[in-house]
Image (tube, helix red, strand yellow):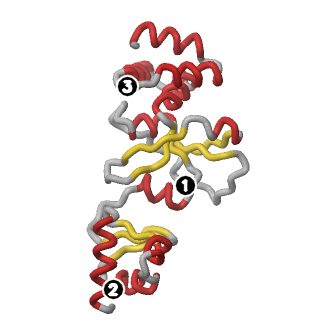
Protein backbone atom coordinates (compact mmCIF):
# COMPACT_ATOMS: atom_id res chain seq x y z
CA UNK A 1 0.00 0.00 0.00
CA UNK A 2 1.12 3.56 -0.68
CA UNK A 3 3.00 4.78 2.41
CA UNK A 4 1.10 8.08 2.57
CA UNK A 5 -2.29 6.37 2.33
CA UNK A 6 -1.19 3.79 4.89
CA UNK A 7 -0.24 6.57 7.32
CA UNK A 8 -3.54 8.41 6.71
CA UNK A 9 -5.53 5.23 7.27
CA UNK A 10 -3.67 4.37 10.48
CA UNK A 11 -4.09 7.94 11.70
CA UNK A 12 -7.80 7.84 10.89
CA UNK A 13 -8.12 4.59 12.86
CA UNK A 14 -6.19 6.12 15.77
CA UNK A 15 -8.57 9.11 15.82
CA UNK A 16 -11.60 6.76 15.86
CA UNK A 17 -10.59 4.34 18.62
CA UNK A 18 -9.31 1.79 16.11
CA UNK A 19 -12.50 1.51 14.04
CA UNK A 20 -12.80 2.54 10.39
CA UNK A 21 -16.03 2.25 8.45
CA UNK A 22 -15.84 2.18 4.68
CA UNK A 23 -18.28 5.11 4.39
CA UNK A 24 -16.34 7.31 6.85
CA UNK A 25 -13.03 6.50 5.15
CA UNK A 26 -14.46 7.44 1.74
CA UNK A 27 -15.54 10.84 3.06
CA UNK A 28 -11.91 11.48 3.95
CA UNK A 29 -10.60 10.33 0.57
CA UNK A 30 -9.57 6.85 1.69
CA UNK A 31 -11.08 4.30 -0.67
CA UNK A 32 -12.11 0.83 0.50
CA UNK A 33 -9.22 -0.59 -1.53
CA UNK A 34 -6.82 0.76 1.08
CA UNK A 35 -8.72 -0.99 3.84
CA UNK A 36 -8.61 -4.27 1.93
CA UNK A 37 -4.88 -3.79 1.37
CA UNK A 38 -4.45 -2.92 5.05
CA UNK A 39 -6.22 -6.18 5.92
CA UNK A 40 -3.99 -8.15 3.53
CA UNK A 41 -0.91 -6.55 5.12
CA UNK A 42 -2.12 -7.43 8.61
CA UNK A 43 -2.83 -3.87 9.78
CA UNK A 44 -6.63 -4.22 9.88
CA UNK A 45 -9.25 -6.90 10.51
CA UNK A 46 -12.69 -6.84 8.89
CA UNK A 47 -15.21 -7.28 11.72
CA UNK A 48 -18.38 -7.08 9.63
CA UNK A 49 -19.53 -5.77 6.27
CA UNK A 50 -18.29 -2.20 5.90
CA UNK A 51 -16.35 -2.05 9.20
CA UNK A 52 -12.68 -2.65 9.89
CA UNK A 53 -10.70 -2.50 13.10
CA UNK A 54 -7.02 -1.83 13.54
CA UNK A 55 -5.25 -5.04 14.51
CA UNK A 56 -4.77 -5.24 18.27
CA UNK A 57 -7.78 -3.03 19.09
CA UNK A 58 -10.24 -4.74 21.46
CA UNK A 59 -13.42 -5.83 19.71
CA UNK A 60 -16.53 -4.06 21.00
CA UNK A 61 -19.57 -6.33 20.40
CA UNK A 62 -22.03 -3.56 21.33
CA UNK A 63 -20.58 -1.14 18.77
CA UNK A 64 -20.41 -3.82 16.07
CA UNK A 65 -24.06 -4.76 16.63
CA UNK A 66 -25.04 -1.09 16.46
CA UNK A 67 -23.06 -0.69 13.23
CA UNK A 68 -24.74 -3.73 11.66
CA UNK A 69 -28.24 -2.85 12.91
CA UNK A 70 -28.45 0.94 13.41
CA UNK A 71 -32.02 0.78 14.71
CA UNK A 72 -31.16 -1.71 17.47
CA UNK A 73 -31.35 0.00 20.86
CA UNK A 74 -29.87 -1.72 23.91
CA UNK A 75 -32.44 -2.06 26.66
CA UNK A 76 -33.36 -3.70 29.97
CA UNK A 77 -30.43 -5.48 31.69
CA UNK A 78 -28.03 -4.63 28.86
CA UNK A 79 -28.81 -0.93 29.28
CA UNK A 80 -28.44 -1.32 33.07
CA UNK A 81 -25.04 -2.92 32.48
CA UNK A 82 -23.94 -0.09 30.16
CA UNK A 83 -25.02 2.41 32.87
CA UNK A 84 -23.00 0.39 35.44
CA UNK A 85 -26.09 -0.42 37.51
CA UNK A 86 -25.16 -4.10 37.41
CA UNK A 87 -21.86 -5.88 36.96
CA UNK A 88 -23.06 -8.40 34.43
CA UNK A 89 -24.95 -8.36 31.18
CA UNK A 90 -27.36 -11.18 30.45
CA UNK A 91 -26.01 -14.18 28.57
CA UNK A 92 -28.12 -12.88 25.68
CA UNK A 93 -27.82 -9.08 25.47
CA UNK A 94 -31.17 -7.36 24.99
CA UNK A 95 -32.12 -5.00 22.19
CA UNK A 96 -35.35 -3.47 21.01
CA UNK A 97 -36.25 -2.74 17.40
CA UNK A 98 -39.18 -1.04 15.72
CA UNK A 99 -41.97 -3.39 14.70
CA UNK A 100 -41.55 -4.66 11.14
CA UNK A 101 -37.81 -3.88 11.16
CA UNK A 102 -36.46 -6.80 9.23
CA UNK A 103 -33.27 -8.51 10.31
CA UNK A 104 -31.97 -11.92 9.42
CA UNK A 105 -31.97 -12.60 13.10
CA UNK A 106 -29.55 -11.50 15.72
CA UNK A 107 -27.97 -14.70 16.94
CA UNK A 108 -26.97 -14.44 20.56
CA UNK A 109 -29.27 -11.45 21.24
CA UNK A 110 -32.70 -11.28 22.84
CA UNK A 111 -34.82 -9.03 20.60
CA UNK A 112 -38.14 -7.37 21.17
CA UNK A 113 -40.12 -5.37 18.63
CA UNK A 114 -42.13 -2.31 19.63
CA UNK A 115 -44.59 0.00 17.95
CA UNK A 116 -42.94 3.13 16.52
CA UNK A 117 -44.60 5.24 19.22
CA UNK A 118 -43.18 3.12 22.04
CA UNK A 119 -39.83 2.45 20.34
CA UNK A 120 -39.03 6.15 20.01
CA UNK A 121 -39.59 6.99 23.68
CA UNK A 122 -36.46 7.51 25.72
CA UNK A 123 -33.52 6.75 23.46
CA UNK A 124 -30.14 7.98 24.62
CA UNK A 125 -26.47 7.07 24.33
CA UNK A 126 -24.15 5.13 26.58
CA UNK A 127 -20.41 4.63 26.46
CA UNK A 128 -19.22 1.04 26.15
CA UNK A 129 -16.22 -0.27 28.07
CA UNK A 130 -14.23 0.11 24.83
CA UNK A 131 -15.03 3.81 24.42
CA UNK A 132 -17.75 3.70 21.75
CA UNK A 133 -21.14 5.39 22.02
CA UNK A 134 -24.13 3.16 21.31
CA UNK A 135 -27.90 3.79 21.39
CA UNK A 136 -29.55 2.68 24.59
CA UNK A 137 -32.81 3.41 26.35
CA UNK A 138 -32.20 6.46 28.53
CA UNK A 139 -31.86 5.95 32.28
CA UNK A 140 -35.48 6.74 33.07
CA UNK A 141 -36.90 4.48 30.34
CA UNK A 142 -34.50 1.70 31.36
CA UNK A 143 -35.77 1.88 34.94
CA UNK A 144 -39.42 1.86 33.78
CA UNK A 145 -38.80 -1.17 31.55
CA UNK A 146 -37.06 -3.06 34.36
CA UNK A 147 -39.91 -2.26 36.77
CA UNK A 148 -42.41 -3.50 34.18
CA UNK A 149 -40.39 -6.74 33.80
CA UNK A 150 -39.73 -7.19 37.53
CA UNK A 151 -40.87 -10.82 37.44
CA UNK A 152 -37.98 -11.63 35.06
CA UNK A 153 -35.36 -10.82 37.72
CA UNK A 154 -34.42 -12.40 40.99
CA UNK A 155 -35.09 -10.05 43.89
CA UNK A 156 -31.41 -9.37 44.62
CA UNK A 157 -30.60 -8.30 41.07
CA UNK A 158 -33.77 -6.23 40.82
CA UNK A 159 -32.93 -4.36 44.05
CA UNK A 160 -29.34 -3.77 42.93
CA UNK A 161 -30.41 -2.30 39.60
CA UNK A 162 -33.17 -0.11 41.05
CA UNK A 163 -31.01 1.18 43.91
CA UNK A 164 -28.13 1.96 41.53
CA UNK A 165 -30.54 3.73 39.17
CA UNK A 166 -31.80 6.02 41.93
CA UNK A 167 -28.23 6.94 42.84
CA UNK A 168 -27.44 7.88 39.23
CA UNK A 169 -29.11 11.28 38.88
CA UNK A 170 -32.47 10.40 37.38
CA UNK A 171 -34.71 13.11 35.94
CA UNK A 172 -37.84 12.60 38.09
CA UNK A 173 -40.04 14.65 35.78
CA UNK A 174 -39.12 12.43 32.82
CA UNK A 175 -39.42 9.32 34.99
CA UNK A 176 -42.96 10.30 36.03
CA UNK A 177 -43.91 11.06 32.41
CA UNK A 178 -42.72 7.61 31.29
CA UNK A 179 -44.39 5.96 34.30
CA UNK A 180 -47.70 7.51 33.29
CA UNK A 181 -47.22 6.61 29.63
CA UNK A 182 -46.40 2.95 30.39
CA UNK A 183 -48.76 2.43 33.36
CA UNK A 184 -46.19 2.19 36.14
CA UNK A 185 -47.20 5.25 38.21
CA UNK A 186 -47.86 3.48 41.51
CA UNK A 187 -44.63 1.47 41.52
CA UNK A 188 -42.51 4.46 40.51
CA UNK A 189 -44.20 6.70 43.10
CA UNK A 190 -43.42 4.11 45.79
CA UNK A 191 -39.79 3.75 44.62
CA UNK A 192 -39.33 7.54 44.59
CA UNK A 193 -40.69 7.69 48.13
CA UNK A 194 -38.39 4.89 49.30
CA UNK A 195 -35.22 5.69 47.35
CA UNK A 196 -35.53 9.15 45.82
The residue pinned by badge 3 equals 169
- For label 3, the crowd category at 10 Å Cα-Cα, with few meaning under 14, some 14 to 19 and many 20 or more, is few
Q: Earlier in the sequence, mark 2 or mark 3?
A: 2
104 left or right of 122 in image: right
The residue pinned by badge 2 equals 5
Q: Is residue 36 above or below residue 140?
A: below
Which type of secondary structure does the marked residue at label 3 adopt? loop
The residue shown at (71%, 39%) is: 115
Q: CA distance from mark 3 to mark 1?
A: 34 Å
Q: Is residue 95 above or below residue 162?
A: below
The residue pinned by badge 1 equals 107
The residue shown at (56%, 56%) is: 70
Q: CA distance from mark 1 to mark 2?
A: 36 Å
- For label 1, the crowd category at 10 Å Cα-Cα, with few meaning under 14, some 14 to 19 and many 20 or more, is few
**Image quarter of residue 85:** top left
Please tell me which residue lies in front, 57 or 126.
Answer: 126
For the residues carrying marks 3 and 1, which lies nearer the camera in this image?
3
Q: Earlier in the sequence, mark 1 or mark 2?
A: 2
The residue shown at (66%, 35%) is: 118
Mark 1 and mark 3 in contact (Cβ < 8 Å)? no
Which type of secondary structure does the marked residue at label 1 adopt? loop
Which type of secondary structure does the marked residue at label 2 adopt? helix
Residue 56 percent location from the top left of the image = 26, 68
Q: CA distance from mark 2 to mark 3?
A: 46 Å
Q: Residue furthest bottom?
A: 2
Number of labels in the image equals 3
**Image quarter of residue 5:** bottom left
Amino acid sequence: MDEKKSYQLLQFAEDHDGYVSVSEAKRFGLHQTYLVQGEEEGQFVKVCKGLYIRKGTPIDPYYILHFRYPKAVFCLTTAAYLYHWTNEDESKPQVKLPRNYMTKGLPGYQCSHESLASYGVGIGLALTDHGQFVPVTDKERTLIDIVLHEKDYDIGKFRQIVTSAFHDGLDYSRLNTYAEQFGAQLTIALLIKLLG
